[in-house]
């Protein structure tokens, strides 16, 4: 064991590259895009030291060109999931006993690999299979992932450094042990960074992991796996299985060694997870840690004093970047009557200026939604809005899936503050606006708080400090990430710890030490230097 109190490099947020015309990063990512577009990759399950190909495969396609196949991945069977659990447990002792600085070095190396040689590839993969524009891919697959890795290493050292008081007679120590068992990571399609961070954050703290990526994110998950392997994560520490979510989860929850789940996905699925774990609670050796970030019905509220151009820009970016497929995306807005005429004109102008198509064309602001299921759901709500008397589509409303799953950015105005699209998470480029009377500011805040079951993100726009203070208090339980004069998306690791409450999850704040604390079990060690040799206390004396 090495001797020394080691200091890790100071974490600094990765700068976002511009991808301006003729820039080297634009040239590199377009070359990577073309190469990967014309290749067909085969992705196995990664269990211990083995790459397992079952022969039961599914195709990976680009949402913006769904007939174009970029690869296949192999579906795991129940025996493979059991094998992944066994391999994780086999790797556990050596990994847990590895000095913390050795674990830190692995993830710091992974960050630098993404910042350098893997940057173009991981961005291109995210553009191809998740239909992100280059800017959305850059801030996600590169910068946010790099930030997660760098800052989590720093947070890890802060946690280890948090020690109790001692005195000359007693030395008190806190050891932050990995959980006793394995962690199950279930990750979403929409953020490559989240897909990597959920297994990596648990592994960094000395845990072993069974990771199930989203079926719609396997293409970029393969790049994550390549990075982790090159960075030096030992075999068995992070095991990767693809396939039927129900079968994989049921197999995991049946294991007595299941120690926790790190989840990002739908609210319905997460509630089922809670129920399943509860029903199996007598099976487990320890009480499993349940960490989840789920849905959102995120709001923008404009006060009459707000700058109308700032409000509209907040809506245009907050609702429509990445086709609204962010749990933090704005999907309901409350605009005062006095502002509405100008806001409506500016918003329609913005939306009509959006270009939509392949992310390979850097002029496109909008691309396709992730798959046909999402497309059909969104089309259904848009069609219903066209029929309803209390709703009006003021821009957008068209869709086409002949080549890609393209939904036109759509703005609905409703006279019913509890209209379906004001309450239901759609996860697509649909914004619903309710116009309120200026004098009903306080009433509107109450309406915002009570309209949705979610409490993930929200934003208010105002130039009136009293109104800002009032809204901050009135909406204190309505959003775990609350934004003042900004869109409700774009949380930065180390700056805005991310997570929400109510139906939006457990609010364990990814991008902070709070999340890492969930993946350790502290042990208090008290060492007494001069141990008593007589049971009698002074009060017993004559």
Image (cartoon, helix red, strand yellow):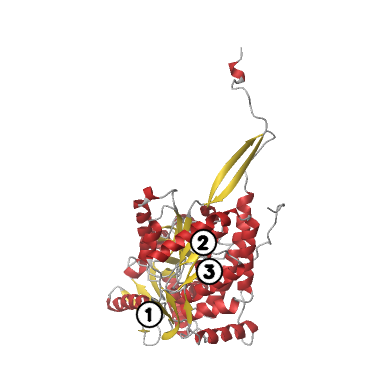
**Residue positioned 57% across, 85% down in the render:** 30
Q: CA distance from mark 1 to mark 2?
A: 33 Å
Q: CA distance from mark 3 to mark 2?
A: 13 Å
* Whether label 3 touches label 2, CB < 8 Å: no
Camera-side residue: 7 or 280?
Answer: 280
Residue 440 in sight in this render: yes
Q: Residue 29, position in %: x, y?
A: 58, 82
Q: Which residue is mark 3?
A: 193
Q: Is residue 90 above or below residue 142?
A: above
| Secondary structure beneath label 3 | helix
Q: Count the marks.
A: 3
* Whether label 1 touches label 2, CB < 8 Å: no
Query: Neighbour class for label 1 at 10 Å: few (<14), some, many (≥20)?
Result: some
Query: Neighbour class for label 3 at 10 Å: few (<14), some, many (≥20)?
Result: many
Q: Is residue 341 above or below residue 481?
A: below
Tell me, for residue 394, which label it has, or none.
Answer: 1
Tell me, for residue 110, which label it has, or none.
Answer: none
Q: Is residue 56 above or below residue 536?
A: below
Looking at the image, is mark 3 or mark 1 earlier in the sequence? 3
Quadrant in which the C terminus appears: top right
| Secondary structure beneath label 1 | strand
Looking at the image, is mark 1 or mark 2 earlier in the sequence? 1
**Residue positioned 63% across, 24% down in the render:** 533
Q: Residue 323, position in %: x, y?
A: 44, 77
Q: Which residue is mark 2?
A: 498
């Amino acid at each position: 064991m090495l001797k020394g109190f080691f200091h890790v490099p100071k974490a600094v947020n990765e700068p976002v590259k511009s991808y301006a015309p003729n820039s080297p990063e634009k040239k590199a990512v377009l070359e990577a895009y073309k190469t990967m577009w014309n290749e067909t990759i085969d992705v196995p399950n990664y269990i211990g030291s083995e790459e397992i190909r079952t022969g039961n495969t599914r195709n990976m396609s680009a949402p913006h060109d769904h007939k174009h196949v970029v690869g296949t991945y192999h579906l795991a069977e129940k025996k493979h999931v059991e094998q992944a659990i066994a391999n994780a447990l086999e790797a556990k002792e050596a990994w847990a006993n590895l000095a913390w600085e050795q674990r830190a070095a692995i993830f710091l190396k992974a960050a630098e690999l993404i910042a350098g040689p893997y940057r173009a590839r991981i961005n291109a993969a995210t553009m191809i299979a998740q239909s992100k524009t280059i800017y959305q891919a850059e801030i996600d697959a590169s910068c946010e992932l790099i930030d997660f890795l760098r800052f989590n290493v720093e947070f890890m050292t802060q946690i280890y450094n948090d020690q109790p008081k001692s005195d000359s007679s007693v030395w008190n120590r806190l050891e932050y042990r990995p959980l006793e068992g394995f962690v199950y990571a279930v990750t979403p399609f929409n953020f490559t960074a989240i897909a990597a961070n959920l297994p990596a954050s648990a592994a960094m703290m000395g845990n072993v992991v069974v990771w199930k990526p989203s079926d719609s994110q396997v293409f970029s998950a393969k790049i994550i796996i390549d990075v982790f392997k090159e960075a030096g994560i030992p075999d068995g520490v992070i095991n990767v299985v693809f396939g039927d979510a129900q079968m994989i989860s049921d197999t995991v929850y049946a294991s007595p060694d299941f120690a926790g789940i790190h989840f990002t996905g739908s609210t319905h699925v997460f509630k089922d997870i809670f129920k399943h774990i509860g029903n199996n609670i007598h099976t487990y050796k320890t009480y499993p840690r349940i960490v989840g970030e789920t849905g959102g019905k995120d709001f923008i509220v404009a006060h009459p004093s707000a700058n109308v151009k700032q409000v509209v820009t907040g809506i245009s970016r907050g609702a429509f970047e990445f086709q609204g497929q962010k749990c933090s995306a704005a999907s309901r807005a409350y605009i005062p009557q006095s502002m509405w005429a100008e806001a409506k004109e500016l918003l329609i102008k913005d939306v009509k200026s959006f270009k939509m198509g392949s992310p390979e064309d850097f002029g496109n602001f909008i691309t396709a939604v992730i798959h046909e299921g999402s497309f059909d759901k969104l089309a259904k709500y848009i069609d219903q809005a066209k029929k309803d008397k209390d709703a009006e589509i003021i821009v957008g409303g068209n869709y086409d899936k002949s080549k890609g799953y393209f939904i036109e950015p759509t703005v609905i105005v409703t006279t019913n503050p509890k209209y379906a699209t004001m309450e239901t998470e759609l996860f697509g480029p649909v914004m619903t606006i309710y116009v309120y009377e200026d004098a009903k500011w306080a009433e509107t805040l109450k309406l915002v708080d009570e309209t949705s079951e979610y409490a993930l993100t929200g934003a208010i726009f105002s130039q009136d400090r009293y109104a800002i203070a009032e809204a901050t208090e009135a909406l204190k339980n309505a959003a775990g990430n609350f934004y003042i004069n900004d869109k409700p998306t774009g949380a930065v690791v180390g700056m805005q710890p991310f997570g929400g409450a109510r139906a939006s999850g457990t609010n364990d704040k990814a991008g902070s030490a709070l999340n890492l604390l969930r993946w350790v079990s502290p042990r208090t060690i008290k060492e007494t230097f001069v141990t008593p040799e007589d049971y009698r206390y002074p009060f017993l004396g004559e």
